[in-house]
Image: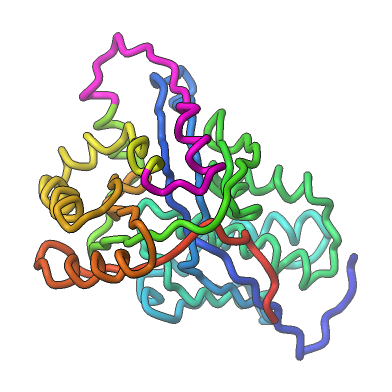
Amino acid sequence: MGMSKPDTVHVTVRVPGKVNLYLGVGPREFSGYHELATVFQAVNIYDEITVKPADTLRITGSGKYGHLVPTDETNLAWQAAQLVAKACGEDPNLEINIDKSIPVAAGMAGGSADAAGTLLACDIYFQAGIPRDELDAMAALLGSDVPFILHGGCALGSGRGDILSPVMTRGSFHWVFATFNEGLSTAQIYERTDELRGLDFETIPDVPNELLAALAQGNAQELGKFLHNDLQAAAIANRSGLKDVLEYGRDLGSLGELVSGSGPTCAFLARDEVSAIDLLVGLKSSGLVDDAVHAHGPVHGARQIR
């Protein structure tokens, strides 16, 4: 605490993106939030967050999507740095570089990942030793997906998605993500969901036991049957082409497909690595998507790599 940092200190933390295998969304509450029942899986599409000394707090972007990184206080990473600095009585005089491979505004929690990575990197940088439960509480303040990205793996999320319990999984699951250059607004997708469902919608979401059993058995074929997203109808209503993309992936042999989170990324579960590569090639040449990437999960959450 309160230690001065030598100029050579660089801390780099790697953070994964996520896919929601199941996303059940309850009615809108008075607070404006929705009760969620979700299953997160962290996948090996990573951002790298590097924190180093600077004369003031600033954010830079690099990598595939670096040009899309917000460099002001709207970035959750900025807010994360301020939270940690305040907690340990330091000035947040840091440069935070975000080397970005997780697509932006894509329903894969890229912004949340950067916040989680910055929390951990700043904790290490300031040698603060913040207890894990306090880091989790800071994460929940920043956003409902941030606690999951700190932990990674596979987890059941309730509340706003920030109350987590680990889910048993066996083996590895292969995914192909179809991505788009233009993102979708999470807030707009929730609003559209409320509109489509009407004011009298009262269903409380619940994750099916069959989905959890399929994860525990490592059974991709069975898992594919239970993939579900309550936000998908709204994402398709806002961008009709997503329906064609999902159907195309199904025709190419996907075991299950859904819009990831608030979209527009579409996630396709493949039988194995070979099938995933076939799917990838098919989607890339379809003319329906801007890019596609093969990934697997579950993987670790935020971790220091340098």
Image coordinates for residue 30, horizontal then vertical, percent: 46, 17
Locate the C terminus by quadrant: bottom right
Image coordinates for residue 138, horizontal then vertical, percent: 69, 47
Stretch of the chain drawn in magenta: 194-221
In the visual, does 200 lie left or right of 242? right
User: Residue 215 colored magenta?
Assistant: yes
* Residue occupying the point 26% across, 38% down: 232
* Residue occupying the point 30% across, 64% down: 275
* Residue occupying the point 56% across, 36% down: 157
Q: Quadrant of residue 12?
A: bottom right
Furthest residue in direction top, as rendered: 200
Q: Is residue 96 above or below residue 224?
A: below
Depth check, front residue: 239 or 252: 252
Q: Is residue 222 above or below residue 179?
A: above
Image coordinates for residue 108, horizontal then vertical, percent: 41, 55
* Residue occupying the point 33% across, 37% down: 225
Q: Quadrant of residue 198?
A: top left
User: Residue 250 colored magenta?
Assistant: no
Instruction: Tell me if residue 230 can be seen.
Output: yes
In the visual, does 11 lie left or right of 247? right
Depth check, front residue: 95 or 292: 292
Q: Quadrant of residue 65?
A: bottom left
In the visual, does 259 lie left or right of 114? left
Locate the N terminus by quadrant: bottom right
Count of numbered circles on the image: 0
